Amino acid sequence: MKSDVRVQGSEKALRRDAAENRQRLLDAAATVFSERGLDVGVDEIARVAGVGIGTLYRRFPTKDALVSELVRQVFDDFLTVANEALSAPNGEGLEQVLYGTGAILASNRGCLSRMWNDDETTILRDEYRRILFELLARAKKHGRIREDATDADLDLIFWSVRGVVATTRGVTDTGWRRTMAIMIAGLSPGADALDASPMSAQHVAQIIDNMSAR
Amino acid sequence: MKSDVRVQGSEKALRRDAAENRQRLLDAAATVFSERGLDVGVDEIARVAGVGIGTLYRRFPTKDALVSELVRQVFDDFLTVANEALSAPNGEGLEQVLYGTGAILASNRGCLSRMWNDDETTILRDEYRRILFELLARAKKHGRIREDATDADLDLIFWSVRGVVATTRGVTDTGWRRTMAIMIAGLSPGADALDASPMSAQHVAQIIDNMSAR
DNA sequence: CAATATGCGGAGTGAACGCTCCGCTTCGTT
DNA sequence: AACGAAGCGGAGCGTTCACTCCGCATATTG
């Protein structure tokens, strides 16, 4: 979703073979982490990518940095989906972005457990959440979502679906889709009154902080 | 929830000091795993329990065995809550057991990530699920839950809440409670039609198998 | 083509961690 | 009190895994 290797123009361009290898490493890492989790060793990543371990470490200072880059790309995808949903009519954008987010989560299982963020990812995440909140407001205005739904409820949907995706692995997509449908139905105007108060914004902020902390 | 040390009467009773140490280890493990996750080393568990590493390994053959015992106790608690809910009137037992389960999950964060099961735990789990399904049927009969809700939806609630609990850590209980409320509302008769088909029983079985596999 | 910078591979290093082993201690019994 | 069985501690072992280092290879420039 972003092919230029340079970041903020501060790094020198890579030699052609080096750039290729970098991409192979990212592809290999995405595949292997998805299929077998983040505990797979770096040597396995290098092997699948067809390069040496040294090459991996010349391109990514630590294993965490490699994972971070993958996470950054996932958030990049989230943001793309969110921006597209902004064009949806009649307040339908919220549902669109939620299902889109679920689909991305489902195809990036490997990175699910480590969602903490570097500075760049934090920016993407904040922008993504800002758009989600805007879409929630629109959905309310069109009567698709109940008035007492809160921004924090969207975070709950995210964490819930992430949990279901992590559990259902590659077995089926019906699990997270059904979860999404149930939660959206629970936030629709016709549903019963909710028997629990929403999370406070302070709590949400603290939780997100914890994720970044490690 | 079960103080006798013997299992199936096949093991000899422990010496008094040994039994004490065993309990201290379980308590220490529950605390430490809850607060810092399952990656904490066995030496730390032993240190907190105030015993040597050797003592830990004389009582539990592997670290996994120690975790398994904790998991078994959690499922024991699930089953207790489920049995209590069977006495609830007017089909209210389902909500009771769901919130009870959430509370147990929230107080056992450490074991969340490894829910795979030994034989004994599998029995507890199956019985627990059987009761949940019974309570779902009753809730439907009393018009508290929509007719098109399925057994598998209860598994989704479990996995969702577990995901939220894992994310919200010790910050707040409002997160998982709100999630539960939203999902129950989504399964209430008044809510919108669900925009997704349920998980098949086969898929659920496969997913649960995967959890036991490792 | 020559010259130089950049990149490459993978054996090796150090740290973390699960687990074992054995000399010493404590408990329970007679 | 005396004795054997059971328990205890923790140094140390083996393995795993992230990461480093350096002699060789390749791309790029002029």
Image (spheres, coloured by chain):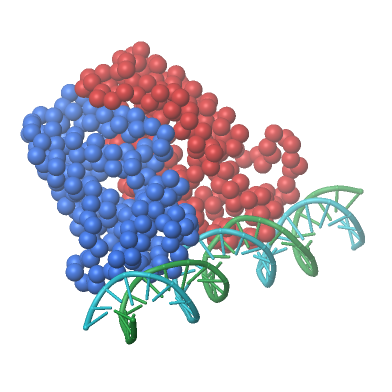
Chain colours: A blue, B red, C green, D cyan
Q: Which quadrant is the C terminus of chain A positioned in?
A: bottom left
Q: Residue at x 61, y 46 (%)?
A: B65
Q: Residue at x 27, y 55 (%)?
A: A72
Regarding residue A130, the answer to whether it shows in the image is yes
Relative horizontal placement of residue A162, taking residue D8 as reference (left or right): left
**Residue ranking furthest to the top:** B141
Relative horizontal placement of residue A15, taking residue A89 as reference (left or right): right
Q: Quadrant of residue A124?
A: bottom left
Q: Taking A131 as reference, is A46 above or below it?
A: below
Q: Taking A43 as reference, is A186 above or below it?
A: above
Q: Position of residue B147 (x, y in %)?
A: 32, 15
Q: Position of residue A200 (x, y in %)?
A: 22, 46
Of C21 and B184, the residue lying toward us? C21
Regarding residue B144, the answer to whether it shows in the image is no
Q: Position of residue B5 (x, y in %)?
A: 67, 41
Of B21 and B42, the residue lying toward us? B42
Q: Residue at x 57, y 29 (%)?
A: B123
Q: Residue at x 39, y 53 (%)?
A: A28
Q: Position of residue C4 (x, y in %)?
A: 32, 85
Of A11 and B53, the residue lying toward us? A11
